[in-house]
Image: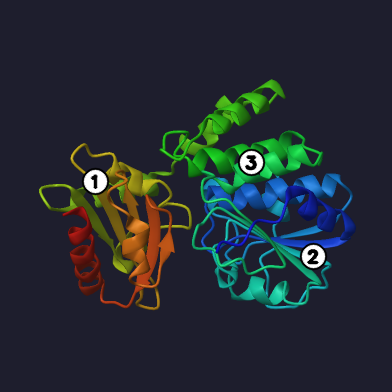
Amino acid sequence: MSVPNNTFSEMAAVMRSAKRIGIASHIRPDGDAIGSLLGLALSLRLEGKQVIPLSNDGVPWNLAFLPGTDQIVKPAGDVLELDLAISVDTASKERVGPNSVIAMSAAKKSINIDHHGSNPRYADLNYIDSTAPAVGQILYDFLSAENFPMDDAVRQNLFAAISTDTGSFQFPSTTARTHQIAAEMINAGLDTGALASKLYDQHPMRRVELLRAMLNEMQFRKGQRIVSWNYTQAAKKQLNVQQGDTEGLIDHLRAIDTVVAAVIFEEQKDGNIRISARSKSDAVNVAEVCGRFGGGGHRLAAGATLPGPITAAAETYLNELENEVG
């Protein structure tokens, strides 16, 4: 039997009763993570709350232009004195990262807002909507319904969250409500064109070189229905890659007309292999495949981690994926 969500009004009451609030999102943050984190944090500050936005891994360069990123704290392992800890876009408590877990460990209450169906509802109050294309969309509806303040900075962050997690409104998870929210933001004065340009049209040359390396080295299986790339530590060092450079790279693989599933195998410093998988067919559930290796995510976008070496990890995962595609 599924556990029902807490209501927006219940969460709003807890937020309004708290004075000092910590908010965190997942490690290796993407657009939905940073945009949701700051969208909520900046709104609560306008409400008069003392808010500490936390990111265990800091802010990737490609999102540093968003308003409020200079106020994000990279925790050092200290316990913070908090009335309330909120996690956004984080499928498990540990996914906020070890230092963020410690920072928020003494909070009197906790709230968990997410869109991953695998989320075990680890907080005192939980709101999980696996049909939402982005946590930014959940937060926009929450802030609107509960009359929390929204200015241009809040809207910029929530738009970035929604746009990036929907593939710029292209992914099947995009709903009519997603487009309605964008229209409401435009009517409120948000310059979505300028924002989209900063999100998608400002790649440094090293990122272009990384794309070239991926396209040169990609490998196909199953009659070009599966495409993969082994992204090694050697490639990172050679191109001086920075956090955020890989954002959206997998979409170039996914966009190939014959491809049903795309996978990037990324070698970590500790030798483990981080798997990022994408599908463009409901018949191929990459979350289910990743789940066999302790990972998870969404039906069309998921991840997992396997021990190295990278060639062995790739072969192990791709053999399972081939069965799914077959």
Q: From the top left corner, tell me how far across and down residue 196 is, in percent.
A: 53, 32
| Residue kind at label 1, given as amino acid type | Val
Q: Residue at x 89, y 58 (%)?
A: 17
Q: CA distance from mark 3 to mark 1?
A: 30 Å
Query: Badge 3 is on which residue?
Result: 158
Q: Residue at x 52, y 47 (%)?
A: 62
Depicted 45 relative to depicted 296: above or below: above
Label at residue 271: none
Label at residue 84: 2
Callout 3: 10 Å neighbours few (<14), some, many (20+)? many
| Residue kind at label 2, given as amino acid type | Leu
Q: Are marks 3 and 1 in contact (CB under 8 Å)?
A: no
Q: From the top left corner, tell me how far across and down residue 278 is, in percent.
A: 34, 51
Left/right of residue 107 with respect to residue 32 in the rendered view: right
Q: Residue at x 25, y 57 (%)?
A: 229
Query: Badge 1 is on which residue?
Result: 260
Q: Quadrant of the N terminus?
A: bottom right
Camera-side residue: 65 or 133? 133
Depicted 160 relative to depicted 129: above or below: above
Can you see residue 68? no
Counting residues from the N terminus, which is met first, the one under dot 3 or under dot 2? 2
Q: Quadrant of the C terminus?
A: bottom left
User: What is the residue that sits farthest to the left in this orientation?
Assistant: 223
| Residue kind at label 3, given as amino acid type | Leu
Q: Residue at x 56, y 48 (%)?
A: 32
Q: From the top left corner, tell me how far across and down residue 267 is, in percent.
A: 33, 69
Q: From the top left corner, tell me how far across and down residue 156 is, in percent.
A: 65, 37
Q: Secondary structure at mark 1?
A: loop
Can you see residue 104? yes
Left/right of residue 204 with respect to residue 93 in the rendered view: left
